[in-house]
Image (cartoon, rainbow, N blue to C red):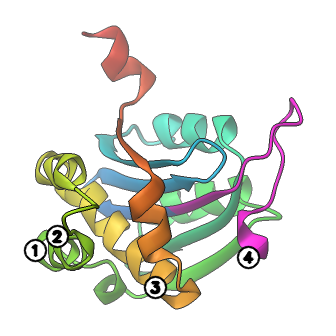
Amino acid sequence: VAAFNSHDDFGHKEGLFASIFECDKTIGVALVDTSMSELIVGQFGDDTFFSNLRTLLSQRHISQLIKQKKACMSPNLHQVLAATSKGICSDDLPDKAFLDVDKTKKIIREIENDEVKLDKLLEICDVNPVGTQALGALLNHLKRYEIIHEVLRTSTFVQYETSDRLSKK
């Protein structure tokens, strides 16, 4: 799939497929990093300039971005994404495409079996409800590519934390 092929500044292959969802001044993110076999989910508050989101977008080489339609997000977030996502293939989806926590966890449980244990991902979902909504849209997109099982079967699950949250620990 072309959306999963890019390179970072060091020549490492990185194919990030990302989903961003805004809800009540909280940003939810879900990223599939195929170069590291990671599925990253998280959420964070941000300032008026979306500094945490800008940092995330500048540190990762995203090749495809799922985001809310312009009418569904704050004007500031729309401006930030327009400025920082030039050259990135993006899909603007209605809010209903960003599934709630229960529906997203249902998709995950449908894939889980004796060989594929997704408890860690479900735990991350429990503490990141807005990030889980971003994940719901991302998982539906992966279904479209028919790679959802492969991504969930082979990925390590990571909770995304902003650098300011890490420095407070």
**Residue labelled with disc 2:** 105
Vertical side of 142 occupied by 13: above or below: above
Residue 6 on the magenta span:
yes
Q: What's the distance in space between the residues labelled 2 and 3, CA to CA?
A: 15 Å
**Residue labelled with disc 4:** 1
Q: Amino acid at mark 1?
A: Asp
Q: Residue at x 65, y 34 (%)?
A: 59
Q: What's the distance in space between the residues labelled 2 and 4, CA to CA?
A: 25 Å
Q: Earlier in the sequence, mark 3 or mark 1?
A: 1
Label 1–label 2 contact, CB within 8 A: yes
Q: Amino acid at mark 2?
A: Lys
**Residue labelled with disc 1:** 102
Q: Position of residue 23 (x, y in %)?
A: 26, 62
Vertical side of 48 occupied by 28: above or below: below
Q: Earlier in the sequence, mark 2 or mark 4?
A: 4
Q: Which residues are magenta?
A: 1-18
Q: Earlier in the sequence, mark 2 or mark 3?
A: 2
Q: Give the image quarter of residue 5.
A: bottom right
Q: Residue at x 47, y 35 (%)?
A: 52
Label 3–label 1 contact, CB within 8 A: no
Quadrant assignment for the C terminus: top left
